[in-house]
Image (cartoon, rainbow, N blue to C red):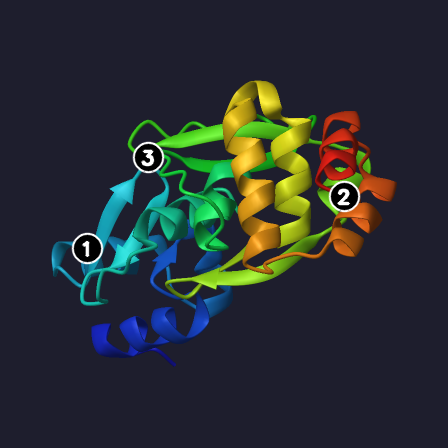
């Protein structure tokens, strides 16, 4: 029984993490009216439409990524954002790059900087790993998958970025040639295959 605002904040922190959507509260026994009272009391903050955060939780370097993943739970963090998180290359995107299923409705996130691409078939599953940002469950492409995607979506990220990512990942052993070739079996890219042949 969540009798006090403090009890409800503890339940939120344990149950959903720093960021959450109102739809997640039913399982915690918290009503929308109680959420509104927590907001008025300053215990939670409304970040964007349909997205809240615990006000006392410390901000992290992955704050925006956490907010996006909480708002779009089916998202896969990918491409330029995944490169940064995997410490590959020098790209510094101003948006959070996510992928959503091919037929999914485009998320409306006017207050969050997001670049959306679409994955379908094997691309939604292969080389996708579980992650967590500021307590928010998320998914992210593996290092090898991220490199492959940079070549598959080269027109979006740029040829130079894709080549730099490949060379950097191999140089600093973030990936192996074998891992890239296994990923190419599932998600072919003629451009990456040619680049690997050049690199030997």
Residue 62: x and y in percent read: 34, 54
Query: Which of the two residues, 70 or 164, is positioned nearer the viewer here?
Result: 164
Residue visible at 51% across and 27% down in the picture:
160
- Asked whether, in this view, residue 24 is left or right of residue 181, the answer is left
Q: Tell which tag, 2 or 1, sits nearer the viewer.
A: 2
Q: For the residue carrying disc 1, how many other residues have a C-alpha within 10 Å: few (<14), some (14-19), or many (20+)? A: some
Mark positioned earlier in the residue sequence (3 or 2): 3
Q: Circle 2 is placed at which residue position?
A: 200
Query: Which of the two residues, 10 or 125, is positioned nearer the viewer here?
Result: 125
Position above or below: 56 against 87: below
Residue 190 appears in the rendering: yes
Q: How many marks?
A: 3
- Asked whether, in this view, residue 151 is left or right of residue 115, the answer is right
Query: Which of the two residues, 35 or 13, is positioned nearer the viewer here?
Result: 13
Which of the labelled discs sits on residue 112, or is there none?
A: 3
Mark positioned earlier in the residue sequence (3 or 1): 1
Q: Circle 1 is placed at which residue position?
A: 39
Q: Tell me if label 3 and label 2 are in contact, CB under 8 Å.
A: no
Q: Quadrant of residue 39?
A: bottom left
Q: For the residue carrying disc 3, how many other residues have a C-alpha within 10 Å: few (<14), some (14-19), or many (20+)? A: some
Residue visible at 33% across and 36% down in the picture:
49
Position above or below: 18 against 70: below
Residue 139 appears in the rendering: no
Residue 95: x and y in percent read: 37, 34
Position above or below: 149 against 64: above
Q: Quadrant of residue 76?
A: top right
- Asked whether, in this view, residue 160 is left or right of residue 61, the answer is right
Query: Which of the two residues, 131 or 150, is positioned nearer the viewer here?
Result: 150
């Amino acid at each position: 029984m969540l009798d006090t605002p403090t009890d409800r904040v503890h339940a939120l922190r344990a149950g959903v993490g720093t960021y959450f959507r109102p739809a997640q509260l039913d399982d915690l026994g918290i009503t929308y009216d109680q959420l509104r009272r927590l907001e008025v009391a300053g215990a939670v903050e409304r970040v964007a439409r349909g997205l809240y955060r615990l006000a006392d939780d410390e901000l992290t370097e992955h704050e925006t990524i956490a907010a996006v993943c909480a708002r779009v739970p089916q998202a896969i963090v990918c491409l330029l954002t995944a490169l940064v998180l995997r410490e590959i290359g020098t790209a510094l995107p101003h948006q959070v790059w996510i992928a959503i299923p091919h037929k999914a409705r485009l998320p409306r996130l006017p207050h969050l900087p997001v670049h959306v691409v679409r994955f379908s078939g094997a691309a939604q599953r292969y080389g996708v790993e579980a992650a967590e940002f500021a307590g928010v469950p998320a998914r992210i492409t593996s290092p090898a998958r991220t490199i492959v995607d940079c070549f598959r979506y080269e027109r979006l990220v740029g040829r130079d970025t894709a080549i730099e990512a490949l060379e950097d990942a191999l140089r600093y052993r973030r990936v192996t040639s074998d891992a890239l070739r296994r990923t190419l079996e599932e998600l072919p890219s003629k451009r990456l295959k040619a680049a690997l042949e050049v690199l030997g």
